[in-house]
Image: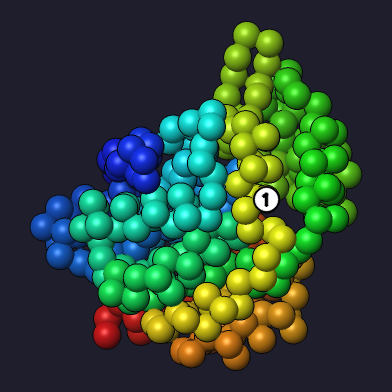
Amino acid sequence: MVRRIEVAGAGGVRLAAWEFADPPKPREVDRSPGVLLLHGLMGRASHWAGTARWLAERHRAVALDQRGHGQSDKPPQGPYTREAYVDDAEAALVQLGLAPAVLIGHSMGALTAWQLAARRPDLVRGLIICDMRASALGAASQREWEDWFKTWPVPFATLADVRKWFGEDDPWVERPNPARGNFYAEVMAEYEDGWHPVFSRDQMLASRATWVYDAHWEELAQVQCPALVVRGLDGELGRAESQEMVRVLPRGAYAEVPDAGHLVHYDQPESWRAAVQPFLDGVLTS
């Protein structure tokens, strides 16, 4: 069972959160340790459905559609700053009664998670960082994204076309990747002229611009709770940087998922679970 909950984010932005409970156990879930799942740039809460369902067997698992994403508000003027995203996640923890919770973040959501853990250690009992770099990516990276967005053949005639383009034809795809095609099919909506992304690409670039030029090692070093850094073997986070992140974290640990790209939890859900469950068991039962 999935239950939608509305959260008031920073500045009154309406955020959609999704609580997973299968089978539903209201009393047990309300008393169980909380987990908040934060998707990456262009993602949505539903990308965490597989993870949330097995978490919900023993814990209270909630996935958040962040501002500008999914079914949450997409204010034309934003803000889409780091502060706004972190404030939203903090509001979700407090309003949903999840704290002290484990934060599980993918890509940009992982950065939000560790920034919140550094700022509000009282709200966070554990942290999982999935394929997100702490180093600055720089201006060239932002220009690459701007150029990439221009190549999207929007509108797509069908969802099958979405899956094929992002899974095979996208110039950023090195080899066919059906999981990637399915990932992007989940963030499309049908309009009269075809299928469009549910987000604004300009807003995604604005969101990215608030963190892509800066390094985030200092905030990483301020995280007091146990933290697990997870990388896909073929993802965007290299082994050397991930191991340096573990070293910088006061209570850091490392896990690697073979045969996975950047979309670690979506590419290889069973291997992802095997990589993170021992850490979660230790944190959530302590």
Residue at (48, 90) in percent of width and height? 250
Q: Which image quarter: residue 282?
A: bottom left
Return the x and y of residue 198 as percentages of the image width and height.
57, 30
Mark 1 element type = helix
Q: Which image quarter: residue 199?
A: top right
The correct choice, above or below, for 270 with respect to 185 in the image is below
Q: Is residue 70 left or right of residue 286?
A: right
Residue nearer the viewer, 190 or 71: 71
Q: Which residue is mark 1?
A: 209
Instruction: Work out whether residue 198 can be spotted.
Output: yes
Residue at (37, 45) in percent of width and height? 10
Return the x and y of residue 193 as percentages of the image width and height.
68, 11
Residue at (52, 75) in percent of width and height? 219
The correct choice, above or below, for 198 with respect to 157 in the image is below
Return the x and y of residue 137 as percentages of the image width and height.
76, 63
Mark 1 residue type: Ala
Q: Is residue 94 left or right of residue 74?
A: left
Residue nearer the viewer, 130 or 100: 100
Residue nearer the viewer, 91 or 285: 91
Residue at (33, 38) in percent of width and height? 12
Dot 1: few (<14), some (14–19), or many (≥20) neighbours within 10 Å?
Answer: some
Colour mode of the rendering: rainbow
Tally of marks? 1
Instruction: Work out whether residue 131 can be spotted.
Output: no
Return the x and y of residue 257 as percentages of the image width and height.
64, 73
